[in-house]
């Protein structure tokens, strides 16, 4: 009976590991879907510097999604900047142009002068 329990515990821990990995790999996808939905609703917009900004502070989860996206983007910009010997802000501006080109219609963009424009 103890042997059966040990085998069951092994299967259980394997299942927990698999579920944990699935959740870990699906987290970015969930964030991307949230970002897409929040951009589509106008609750989040894109900035000229490659970061996102909350346009509607009343939108559920908008600030946490923006914080998470910006943390990831800042990290990427810093890595790219270090490897190329430029400032992270410069990298962010390059990415902002790419984001603008790839963003779906209806996405809001904040320019350097504080003006919002919709794609």
Image: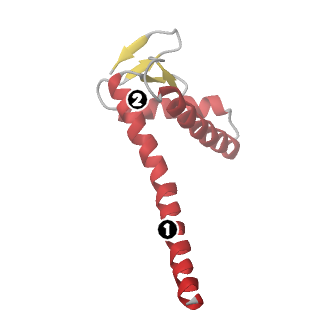
Q: Nearer the viewer, residue 108 or 111?
A: 108
Q: Position of residue 48 (x, y in %)?
A: 51, 22
Q: Nearer the viewer, residue 1 or 99?
A: 1
Quadrant assignment, res 80: top right
Q: Position of residue 92 (x, y in %)?
A: 57, 32
> From what the image shows, is residue 100 above or below residue 21?
above
Residue tagged 2: 100
Question: How far is the residue under mark 2 from the one under mark 1?
Answer: 37 Å
| Left or right position of 21 against 86 | left
Quadrant assignment, res 109: top left
Query: Quadrant location of the N terminus?
Result: bottom right
The residue drawn where x is 48% and y is 63% is 19
| Mark 1 crowdedness (10 Å alpha carbons): few <14, some 14-19, many ≥20 | few
Residue tagged 1: 18
Q: Secondary structure at mark 1?
A: helix
Numbered badge on residue 70: none
């Amino acid at each position: 009976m103890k042997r059966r329990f040990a085998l069951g515990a092994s299967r259980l821990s394997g299942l927990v590991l698999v579920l944990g990995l699935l959740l870990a790999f699906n987290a970015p996808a969930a964030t991307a879907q949230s970002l897409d939905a929040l951009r589509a609703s106008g609750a989040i917009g894109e900035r000229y510097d490659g970061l996102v900004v909350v346009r509607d502070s009343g939108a559920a989860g908008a600030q946490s999604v923006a914080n998470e996206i910006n943390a990831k983007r800042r990290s990427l910009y810093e890595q790219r900047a270090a490897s190329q010997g430029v400032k992270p802000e410069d990298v962010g501006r390059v990415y902002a142009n790419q984001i603008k080109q790839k963003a779906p219609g209806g996405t809001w963009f904040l320019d350097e002068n504080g003006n919002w424009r919709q794609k």
